Image: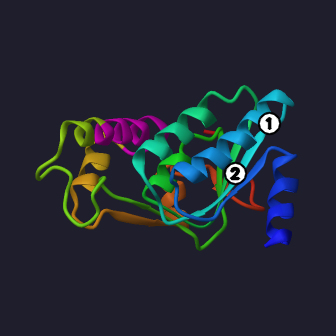
Amino acid sequence: MKFKKAFLNSLALHGTFYLDNDINPKTLEKFSKVAIYARLNGLPLTTYIKSSGGDVPSCLKMYSIIQSHPFPTKGILMGEANSAAGMVLQAFDERLMHRYNTVYLHALESRRSIYENPSDEAKRSQMIIETIFVKRTKLSEKEVKAIMESLNGKRFFDQEALDAGLVDGFINEPVVPH
């Protein structure tokens, strides 16, 4: 455990965060500290992502922190970016992934569609999420809505994620400017 903490602290000194669990208030707190340190020291912000998702309020706050970072930002997918993690990935200036990894998108409620009986807060959050995907990817509003309305959402494998604009390129391969 001491090694892991020392490793994560050494990454933080370079403006790097390793997101390897669910996004929740505790994850947000740790991420915020790394982002503040990077901002105060004029560092780019890099985040390695391997996450099954998490809660929407924390992910939207992470998204805002990344978007407001005054120096270059890079998100690197290592495994999967499911649900909320897929949305956080969209915040970065540069979004990369390893081959054979995936991004999984779905509505706020994965077991049943958010459109069946949503609260006002859920509707508002869902609208924000859909707007982000339309703005940051090559997916149209109609395509995003269809994914979100689908009971099972959609899993994008590496080439599909690139084609949809969910990522900009692959690690160790040239990035094509968008």
| Residue 176 visible to an observer of this rendering | no
Q: Is residue 164 left or right of residue 31?
A: left
User: Is the C-beta separation of discs 2 and 1 under 8 Å?
Assistant: no
Amino acid type, residue under disc 1 in the picture: Ala
In the image, residue 10 sits, relative to residue 58, either above or below, namely below
Mark 1 lies on residue? 38
Badge 2 marks a residue whose secondary structure is strand
Quarter containing the N terminus:
bottom right
The figure's colour scheme reads rainbow
Give whichever of 102, 107 is nearer the camera.
Answer: 107
Q: Which residue sits at x=49%, y=54%?
A: 86
How busy is the neighbourhood of tag 1: few (under 14 within 10 Å), some, or many (20 plus)?
A: many
Q: List x then y, in percent, for residue 174.
A: 75, 54
The quarter of the image holding the C terminus is top right
* Helix, strand or loop: magenta stretch: helix
Taking the spot 27% from the left edge, 53% from the top edge, the residue there is 148
